[in-house]
Image (cartoon, grey):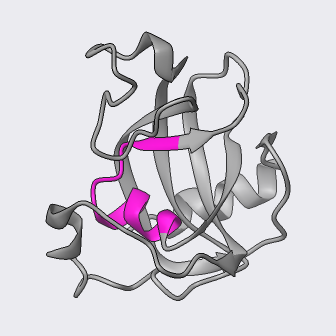
Amino acid sequence: MMRILTVRQPWAWAIIHAGKTVENRTRSLGSYRGPVAIHAGLKIEHDVVMPLDAIALADRRPAWYATGAIVGVVELLETHHADLCRDRDGHCSPWAEANRHHLTFAAPRGLTEPLPFAGGLGLRRLDAATEQLVLEGIA
């Protein structure tokens, strides 16, 4: 069964469209590996600093302004604490933050249209009906 993770914008957009392969969290979200629907939360973070290569993709914004909706799907490959990053300084990716738990993603697939959905905390199970709508909506 697919899981769902709520992420604030513009980070949800960056995960699906700008190569953001690491999501930073203050605590571990468990041992699940597999498909995760990315839900754009209602709150938007302003004054965001992104790696330069992501800024070059800013014209690809189909999900940039979507809030309160599922915007795509990724594969969750691994989770680890920054202390265990490959380069030992907590920066296993340009997106990684020190002293955080890192969720490492691959294979982002955007939905053709954002799918309205209620957000929540943590890595939650997605109900079967919504999972089917997400799979049908992948671009």
The image quadrant that residue 114 belongs to is bottom right
Residue displayed at 35% across by 52% down: 20
- Expressed as whole percent of the image width and height from the top left, the position of residue 84 reads 45, 11
What residue span does the magenta drawing correspond to?
11-23
Q: Is 14 inside the magenta-drawn segment? A: yes
Which residue is nearer to you in this view: 44 or 133? 44
Q: Residue 21's quadrant in the figure?
A: top left
Determine if residue 97 is in view: yes
At x 80% / y 40%, what residue is drawn?
Answer: 125
Q: Quadrant of the C terminus?
A: bottom left
Name which quarter of the figure residue 7 lies in: bottom right
Residue 84 versus residue 55 in the image, above or below: above
Direction from residue 69 to residue 36 in the image, left or right: left
Q: Can you say whether 35 is above or below 31 in the image?
A: below
> Residue drawn at (44%, 73%), measured in percent from left and top?
48
Q: Position of residue 57 (x, y in %)?
A: 19, 75
Q: In the image, 97: left or right of 25?
A: left
Coordinates of residue 122 in the picture (x, y in percent)? 79, 42
Q: Is residue 126 above or below residue 31?
A: below
Q: Is residue 79 visible?
A: no
Is-magenta flag for residue 60? no
Give whichever of 21, 51 is nearer the camera.
51
Which part of the image, by quadrant, shows the N terminus?
A: top right
